[in-house]
Image (cartoon, rainbow, N blue to C red):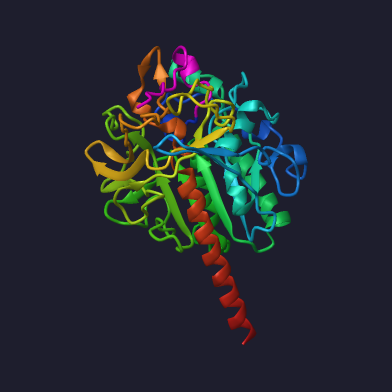
Amino acid sequence: MVRSNRLLLCGALATLSMTAWSLTALAQTPAAPEATPASQPPNDYAKAENWLCRPGREDACTVDLATTVVSSNGKLTREAFKANANAPIDCFYVYPTVSMDKTGNSDMEAGPEEKNVVRSQFARLASQCRTFAPLYRQISLTALRAMMSGQAMSADRTLAYKDVLDAWKYYLEHDNRGRGVVLVGHSQGSGVLTRLIAEEIDAKPFQPKLISALLLGTNLAVPKGKDVGGSFKNIPLCRAKDQLGCALAYVSFRSNVPPPSNSRFGKVSGENMMAACVNPAALKGGSAPLHAYLSNGNGGTATVPESRQWVKPQQQIDTPFVSVPGLVSGECIADERGSYLSVKVNADPNDPRADDIAGDVVREGKIAEDWGLHLIDANVAMGDLVDLVAAQSKAYVKQQKKSQQLSAD
């Protein structure tokens, strides 16, 4: 019954001031001159300050993730969150484009934007895994704005990748100790991880330790009608909850606002190739309810907080997140518009709950339809992603125990 306001950001530049951004967008923008990689010294990932998240400390992943469940009848229920200090697997996260630094590449000082996006997209996985999230000198939002305005500035894409590669190598040498790993990224972070997987994991000795790769908000190439090939040669798409060594990718759009012809999402180049779409709530395909964790407008996401009314009459909600069972559902669609996760809002004007969700990119008062729901790619199915990692973790532990028993026999 309640119509909640869509995300409104003032002005073309402010529209993307806190959003994520895929490397696909970079590829479609005039190239900027790159700094010489050798001119930038490598980061020392032995230093604690070069990580947003590491196990056993208070950091960007140890935050309040309490959630208010808003039922269709208007009932509010508080859902607590608890991290698992004894989680048997690890999660390694590369965040999207959020840096507000004025240079083409960000610095190594964690700002509120980096911390907030961890809270929104990654920290909840601490219920299933030890969390690792390195800072890296990503292509900044300043560089994005410059490129979009036709005034490209110096930015080094290679530097961003090399930082993540160095962090990954440090993690493998000092922290992994044979544990299985889930790789998690969004947008620019997914693009960096796609390269890392292709160059360092696919058909390499570490591949058996890859539990899954959750590559959100990016165009992962696969052959049409197939689950393996394209971006990765030996890593298939995830089609079962207990499947190991697989990848999940999607870009999200409203069901009533599908990708327009100028969208940078849901399409890849190459004959007989398509962008992968795997619905976290229905791995084999079809429509299913999405378990979303949405911002309550007080720092829960990387976006600008907005005023919310989740039920009528309005009730006070003091948690950073809300969950809205049954309000949103998703289905992977592949048609002439592209391949994407179609998100339907199941509004009921006769119940007291809100009839819409925020998440659109809005520019000068107009929805930027080509961006879809890129702002909330992770949030709209976060509960399903957590459930998937939980199932994969159990399958991995079972596999390891079986392997150890066979070795002992």
Q: Which sits in the foreground, 336 or 103? A: 336
Q: Which corner quadrant holds the N terminus?
A: top left
In the image, is residue 55 above or below residue 11? below
Residue 246 magenta: no
Residue at coordinates 40% horizontally, 58% vertically from top-left?
Answer: 236
Specify whether 113 is left or right of 363: right
Query: Which residue in the rendered view is the most extreme toward the left?
Result: 336
Residue at coordinates 54% horizontally, 64% vertically from top-left?
Answer: 394
In the image, is residue 289 above or below residue 375? below
* Residue 276, visible in the rendered structure: no
In the image, is residue 319 above or below residue 361? below
Whole-percent x, y for residue 124 in the image: 58, 44
Q: Which sits in the foreground, 59 or 13? A: 59
Specify whether 310 is left or right of 179: left
Whole-percent x, y for residue 243 in the image: 45, 63
Q: Which sits in the foreground, 92 or 348? A: 348
In the image, is residue 210 above or below residue 269? below
Q: Main secondary structure of the magenta part?
A: loop
Query: Which residue in the rendered view is the most extreme toward the bottom?
Result: 409
Residue 409 in which image quadrant: bottom right
* Residue 337, visible in the rendered structure: yes
Whole-percent x, y for residue 237 in the image: 40, 55
Whole-percent x, y for residue 288 in the image: 34, 48
Residue 15 magenta: yes
Specify whether 219 is left or right of 81: left
Query: Which residue in the rendered view is the most extreme toward the right?
Result: 47
Residue at coordinates 49% horizontally, 43% vertically from top-left?
Answer: 382
Instruction: Magenta stretch: give its range.
Output: 1-19
